[in-house]
Image (cartoon, grey):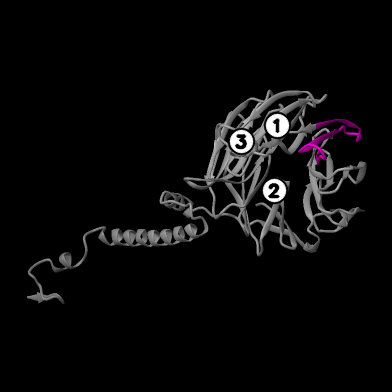
Amino acid sequence: MQKTKTGVNLLKEPREQVNPEPGSRTSGIVMALLLFLCIVSVAFYTYQKSLNPSSGPKDLLQIFQRAGSDVNEAEVQYRFDFDSGENPVFAVYKDYIVKCDTSGIWFMDRKGDVVWSESIVFGKPAIKISGSRLLAADIGSGGIYVLNDKTIRWQEKLDTAILNADISEDGYVTVITSSKRDNNEVRVFDPNGIELFRKIIANDFAVSACISPSEKTLAVSGISAGTARAYSNYKFYNKEGEELADQAFDATGELLPIFWYNHDDSIYAVGDSASASIDKTGKLVWEKQFKRVAGASPAGNAYLAAAVEDDAGAQLKIFDKAGKEISSCSLQGKPEGLNAIKGAIAVNTYDTVYFYNEKCKSTGKYSAASHVRQVRFLTRQQAVIICDGSIIVVNIV
């Protein structure tokens, strides 16, 4: 008679009684692996929750879905430093990285070498790019400079302070200035710098303005503050300054001051917690509310890309002009900004940039060593990342 270590008698077929059932060892290993994955996933979810407090239990499923996918780190091609003491602003214009600070405008190549510059005194510079032209304006002062490549096509010194300025793809410049008697004044210049007309904004506070791609209308976004709560208001004028249409967001009380024209003269409008589409006649097509809009930008094909936070957490969403959600995905971390061109989207958190295509499929990321200020695309495969005191040019693998 044999005894096991526990003292139980084994009367027959002792080996079959001692060994586990066929497949039980494999099942045990699988269960152990599943338990390990659950522990790791919950730990990672807890970390995500610390970064994004709006995360919910449903995000655990998305963590499992992302567990097997690797995100390629973008390849650093060039890196160079700049003096952040002069509060410069940056843009990508044609094949150049443009820096505008209190002492002038600087065109740099990808390596950071200056290929052209112009000494201009700015108090608070702002840059807008559209088509083949670059607009530099001195906010708070009255200076306007319009460039085509490395040539200043025209410039103007206004007698009132500039609050905002924009340029259309065909070179029409719209400038919002302060007014001595009214709230604001909008001044419109043609591509040669000839002033076409001025429009006084008496009741609202104008925020931004731009001429449509067809050159038929001027859109002005303003804020109405005459009621219990402020709301955005869009007015559309012809080139003689006559009002054509008016779209107010008084029902929802939303502020959507930023807008972009589509090629058919329709508009995408965005604010801190909402986005909307307005057709070329000034009629509201759709409006969507979120807990927060971290950033938005046209993404080509008449799409709008938006990094938002809602009940499902932080997400990247792509909409068309009809309001249909073309694609979406969950975002890692708390989004702080977004930039896009046709076929490529960049969403940045405090210190990381995530790249996507227009189907919201991840195409890469860049982990910065400092705060990411903004991201601009040179091409769909190459981006410029502006951090505190440094610029990094990366290839998106």
User: How dense is the environment of label 3, judged by Cα within 10 Å: few (below 14), some, or many (20 and up)?
Assistant: few
Q: Nearer the viewer, residue 213 or 145?
A: 145
Q: CA distance from mark 1 to mark 3?
A: 31 Å
Q: Amino acid at mark 2?
A: Gln
Direction from residue 94 to residue 338 in the image, left or right: left
User: How dense is the environment of label 1, judged by Cα within 10 Å: few (below 14), some, or many (20 and up)?
Assistant: some
Residue bearing mark 1: 262
Q: Which residues make up the magenta segment? A: 175-199
Q: Amino acid at mark 1?
A: Asn
Q: Nearer the viewer, residue 255 or 343?
A: 255
User: How dense is the environment of label 2, judged by Cα within 10 Å: few (below 14), some, or many (20 and up)?
Assistant: some
Vertical arrangement, residue 322 with respect to residue 150, above or below = above
- Could you say which disc has been placed on residue 381 in the image? 2
Question: Helix, strand, or loop for circle 2?
Answer: loop
- Residue 140 belongs to magenta span: no
- In the image, which is nearer the foreground, mark 3 or mark 2? 3
Q: Main secondary structure of the magenta part?
A: strand
